[in-house]
Image: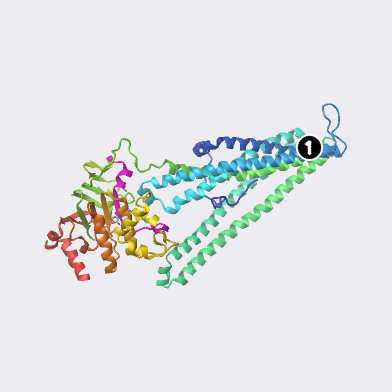
Amino acid sequence: MARSGLNSSGTDVNSELPKKKLTKQSFQQGLRIFRFTLPYRAKFSIGTVLLTLSSATTMAFPWIIGKLADTASGKPLLLPNGSAVTINQIALGFAVLILLQGLFSFGRIWFFTQVSEFTVRDIRQALYQKFVSLPIPYFEKNRVGAITSRITSDVGIIQDSFSLTLAELFRQVMTLIAGIVFIMVVSVKLSMFMLLTFPPIVVLAMVFGKKIRVLAKTTQDELAKTNVIVEETLQGINTVKAFTNEQFETGRYTASLTNTVRAALKSNLYRGGFVSFVIIGLFGGIVLVLWRAATLVQAGQMTIGDLTQFALYTMFIGASVAGLGELYGKVQSTLGASERILEILDEPTEPTHQPGALPLQVHGNIEYRHVAFSYPTRPDLPVLQDISFDIQAGEKIALVGPSGAGKSTIVQLLMQFYELSGGSIVVDGRDIGQYDLTELRRHIGIVPQETMLFGGSIRENIAYGKIIATDEEIVLAARKANAWQFISSFPEGLDTLVGERGIKLSGGQRQRIAIARAILKNPAILILDEATSSLDSESEKLVQQAMDELMQDRTSIIIAHRLSTIRKVDKILVIDGGRIVEQGTHDELAHSENGLYANLLKLQFELT
Ligand SMILES: Nc1ncnc2c1ncn2[C@@H]1O[C@H](COP(=O)(O)OP(=O)(O)OP(=O)(O)O)[C@@H](O)[C@H]1O
């Protein structure tokens, strides 16, 4: 029978996700997901054997009941030796069979559940591993929600499929075939009559069912739209309030709710029709068959036991046909889900481990040679053009320029988050493409504009720079980053929780955590992306000191927003519109008449 409900993914697996047309090709594609069950094939085989046994015992029930009826009405079952089986003996046999059936069912569920839970864990793990090793552009082209639903909904469908759908499919097909064979044995005449009556009803019911599914999907889509409104407004609640648009948003939500109700009512109108059709069609058919059977019994062509058997097998057949109809939809969803999962697993990952890549000892000489770049999401818009500069190991350079000039992009290319559109970047004399990506990134540290803290303790957050760091190392890093002062002022020190459920750190404190992280990582090359939001002067001083400490003896690239902080760097590159428009030391650039840097300086001076 069709089952529904929540599985351990917490997803409603019956929700209408895109389905896949059943073709030979889609079937073969979808079956590839089965390779994940291979490690558990022994359990799978045991489950299948138990399933076969439990189905077979179920199929024996009508037969025994028929024999019971015959024995009761004076036509006992004769053994090969001629002795008759008593009612008590039949009933005892029946009881044993029921007991066995119970055991088989328990075993089947237990084994199939194990297969599905382990398989699903492996699929999720493979997907996650894939996600984290996909290149950055993938995440810009696909919405995070869509990606996470692969690992929740789609995997949920697969889970349901391994634990239920497959077993059901197998059982229903077996029931259908065995049921038809049994009723044929009981009475060919009545079977033919029945097989002519029911299939048309079933076909009609299937067409009807399809229409209902389409309508149910519309209802769900409408409901999803209302959820989008709730999410949007709650996320931007400050904006809603600031613009005093509470009433407007409520109106928008109400309108959307009305649409949902309208769709739901329409869908349920059809559902009601469907139910009454099934009742009339199905029971009408049953009455018709019973009438024919009664005439056959009256004519002495069937016994009461035959009739009982026939009626029960027919019910089994009916149930399995109905079940198969529903399973068809589930198989389609499974194939769809499995294809979407496999699609991700087939995505090319970042070339993290290049065969024959060089083991790394990075000094930090960097050279950009005519670098050109456009973001993959906007290939027609050149973001960088002809960027050429070099930095000797240990030097410090600053990138300055108006917002959107391309400063962050320049450093992201060094991290190899994206592929260049032209030119090359060379580190210690070799093209960065020749390095093992993971190895190279290991030697680059970054203090970003906005420090992301993970939910967890301060200790864990600092140790993100070096997972295996000891407490001494962490404290030392925190001291060098001027962070120890505030950390030790918390009662729980390094164990203080930060993030969503912990305390909120100020911008300056977060930056110092990021600096401590970078100190622990101890990279040869350092990227400092100055925060645009200004800190109070005390905090600013602490952060600046920490940055100076961090930059010592490292090749450093500073994306500067406050020009006061970069007077001492070896070279300043002024970027505008994706090009280097000026370069030189602070003193050189500050005195160049009409230069962009001189102008920016003037502007900041006036502002302060
Ligand atoms: N992920 C992205 N996908 C597409 N375009 C992007 C992406 N990131 C940045 N851009 C665009 O590239 C250009 C350069 O952006 P970039 O972030 O490098 O500028 P920036 O000089 O660092 O600016 P800011 O000082 O405001 O941080 C901008 O026009 C921006 O809109």
Identify whether 608 is placed above or below 472: below
Which region of the structure is painted magenta? 434-458
x, y (%) of residue 498?
Answer: 41, 61
x, y (%) of residue 607?
Answer: 22, 70
Query: In the shown orientation, is residue 324 left or right of residue 534?
Result: right
Which corner quadrant of the figure contains ligand 1?
Answer: bottom left
x, y (%) of residue 456?
Answer: 43, 57
Residue that lies at the very extreme toward the front in this rendered image? 472
Identified at 48% across, 67% down, the residue is: 252
Identified at 20% across, 48% down, the residue is: 393
Q: Quadrant of residue 355?
A: top left
Query: In the shown orientation, is residue 190 left or right of residue 362?
Result: right
| Helix, strand or loop status at disc 1 | helix
Q: Where does label 1 land, which residue?
A: 93
Identify whether 331 is placed above or below 241: above
Res. 569 visible in picture: yes
Which residue is at the front of the view, 61 or 192? Answer: 61
